Each structure stands twice: as structure tokens, then as C-alpha cells.
Amino acid sequence: MKHSLTSIALGALLLSQSALAGLYSAKDHVVDITAQNFQAEVMDSNHLVMVEFYAPWCGHCKNLTPHYKAAAKNLHGIVKLGAVDCDDDKNRPVCSQYDIKGFPTIKVFPANRGGKKGVKHPKDYQGERTAKAIVDHLVKLIPDDIKLVTSNPSSEKITNIDEFVAKESEPRALLFTKKLASSNMYKGIATDMKDRMIVAEMRVPNDNVLKQFNLDNLPTLLVFPKDSQEPVVYTGELKRDPITEFLDQYAAPAKTGKRAAAPAPKPAVVEFNPNISQIADQTQFKNECLDKPIGSCVIAFLVVEPEFPESVQMHEENLETLRKVKKTAFDKNRPLHVMWMDALDKRVVGLMDQFQISSDIPGLLLINPGKKAYAPFVGAFDVEGIQGWLSDSSSGRGRVFPYSFEVALPEPSTKETKKAEEKAEEKSSIKDEL
């Protein structure tokens, strides 16, 4: 049997957690962060790091993408901006670790200087989702690893220039400048070189210093190699990459390999929940299915008549079938939200009509709210039949369709509810008059 490309694509969208490519490519300045490199790129980094947790199908994430790319380009080499694709199964542990419940979620991991190496405590970014707002926010948090040097230090935090030059045990870089504040670029270079060399700055040097170091123009960057007090003058462009390449020649080797540092906190162990909830109203429907950021929903349409033991027994058997299907998905680390609705409820009948579901009971509907795709049930209502249907839906062998309407389980409008509403209006109007 042949299947259309549309059917196959929708099937992949319905259940696959990695069907869409990420929103960022290698040419962008946004670092692709995964569960495997999270510790190295974020926790062990000397830099301030902003991390976006996203899903490729998320509309808000797509809207953010050009702004995030622009901010990353603007702050390249100064602040690290990365992104985690939570739709990728491999990244689910790190997304779970930080309790990501909606997309995009943006967290800022500080450049810890007083805390334990490899341990950072992030804060949620609550600002506007524009490049300017992101840049403005991060610039305020940039760490300053530049040592200040003067001829006459006024505090212990400032180093005497003669002592700085004489400290031959480490390589040193010294920028002489007319500016009264450090540039963000130089701050980024200092952070890059942290633990490899001392990066310092002398602002508005006096005539004696200018003469001592033969400084004709400012800014001028000098490097004092390890075991030497003779400076090497940098003559290249005053841009980040060439300056970094120059300093690399004299800096201590970058540390590589694993170090004995505290690992990132392990994600909490999630235990299997065997409960199959009955959906009774729109609020519960949203909580259990429609507002879930990841995964698909399996909705069973069942009928149970409590006054008949045979009906109750059949209902329990149907729920047990659903539990086994849910457990299989859980064991395979596939987010599948399983629930049931009363097929005799007029609101549920309306929902079945929306998706053109057969009135045969028991029935099933598979939907992915985030990707707006659904599949009606075809097969036997048993574990093997349901799992086969799910497999066919994900591979494109089954019938899968898009939908564009808002899924709703409206509250019934009855005489009782109307009377309650009228009474509430009367109370409200009386209260207003008082």
C-alpha cells in the first residue's frame, strides 16, 4: 500500500520527538547544547551563559529565533548564548532536570567567581524577547576579570605597575588605554584567558609610564611572557579574534580532560504513574493534555454503567489495557498522556464529532496539541492492537491528519447553570449597589 508524503510527515510529527531540525545551525553564534555537553559548555564555562530551552515546533520559539541569533552575534566572545532542543529524546534528562514545562524557557547561568567550580545556580530570564532587551540584560551581568594597574594603588584590589611587571611566575597582558572603563570586548578576552594568564589594564597612564614603556599611541597592548620582564608589543588589529590568537602564544596551556569537580545535579527519578484519569471538563483537559509541552495524548471514549457489574468489570479491563500501553511508552521514554472520557457525555460527543471519530465504543483518538495533528483509531481495542495503531501513526502507515481549530470541551448550558448564573448576577449587582 502506498502512502502520501503528507501522511508520513504528519505521522512523524505526531509521535516523533526529533522529527524537526533544530532552530539554530553551525553558522549561528548560538551554541548547540545537549545533555552530553551541558556540563562543559555551561557549568564549567568561565563565561556568563544564557540557555534557551525550546522545541522546534513552538511558535513562540520561532519568533524568538532571529532575536536570539542577533543577540548571540552581538555578544560573541563576551557572553555565551546556547540552546537546548527539548524535543530531542537525548536532551530530555537536562530539560527535566531544570523542570522545563513550557517553551521557550530562558535561564541565565552566572559566571560564578566565589562559588564552587562547575556549580551554577541559574535564574529565569523574564525580560522582553528582543535582541536589544537580551543584550542589555546580559551586559549588566558580564564578569570583570580584568586586573587594574596604576602607579599609586589606592586599594588592595589595584596592583602597582612595578609589582605587576616583576611577577614573572605568570604570563601577563597589560592594556594601556585612555578610557576610564573597561570595554566589553576586553572583559570577554579576560574571561577567555582566566586561569591561563593575568589580563590587566592601566587607564590614562601618566607621562612617566608612557616614557617607561615607549608608548606613542593609546590603546597599546603589551604581553610580559612567563619568566620575563621584557614586554612584547601587539601590533595587530584591535579586534577580539586576532588579540586572542596573540595572547594564546604566551598564555599557559588550556586545561583539558576531566577534572575532579562536582557533577551537575542528577535529574529526579520519575516513577510510573498507572492512573488513567477521567477528563470531566475543559480545565482538566488542558492540564492533562492540551497544555503539555511535549508528547501526544491518547483519549479513550468509554461507557461505564455503575449499576451493572458486567459494565464495571468491562470498564476496569479497558483501563488495564490502557495502563499497559502507557507503561510500554513510559519504559521507552516516550511521553504519552493517556486518559478517558465518558462517551455518553454530550460535550464528549461534540469533541468526537470535531475529529470525526466513529461512534463505536470503546474508541480512541491520538492527538498532538503542539503539532496540531491527530489520528483516529483503527484496530482491536487490546494492547497489541493499540500499540500497532500508535506505531502505524508514527511511521505514516496509518491515517494522520492536521487540524487548525481550537480543541474544546465546552461546559453544558443547562437550566440549573443558567439559574446559578442569574443568581450570581443578582448578588453581584446588589454588591455593586451597596
Image: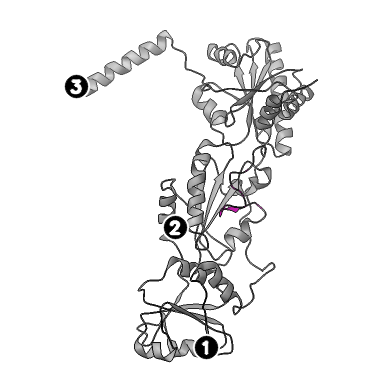
Describe the element under mark 3 as helix, strand or loop: helix
**According to the image, label 2 marks what residue?**
138
Check the image and report above or below for 25 versus 232.
above
Describe the element under mark 2 as helix, strand or loop: helix
Q: Is residue 26 magenta?
A: yes
Q: Earlier in the sequence, mark 1 or mark 3?
A: 1
Please tell me whether the stretch drawn in magenta is mainly helix, strand or loop: loop
Q: Residue at image x 41%, y 84%?
A: 216
**According to the image, label 1 marks what residue?**
167
State the CA–CA distance, disc 1 to disc 2. 34 Å
Judge left or right: residue 429 versus residue 144.
left
Where, quadrant-wise, is the C terminus in this rendering? top left
Q: Residue at image x 56%, y 34%?
A: 292
From where the camera sits, is residue 103 visible? no
State the CA–CA distance, disc 2 to disc 3. 51 Å
Task: Name the spot of residue 296 as percent of width and height, x first.
Answer: 63, 30
Kind of residue at disc 3: Glu
Kind of residue at disc 1: Lys
Check the image and report above or below for 371 versus 51.
above
Q: Earlier in the sequence, mark 1 or mark 2?
A: 2
Residue 433 — which label?
3
User: Callout 2: 10 Å neighbours few (<14), some, many (20+)?
Assistant: many
From where the camera sits, is residue 186 visible? yes
Residue interval drawn in magenta: 22-35
Which residue extends farthest left?
434
Kind of residue at disc 2: Leu
Task: Name the spot of residue 113 as percent of width and height, x first.
Answer: 50, 68
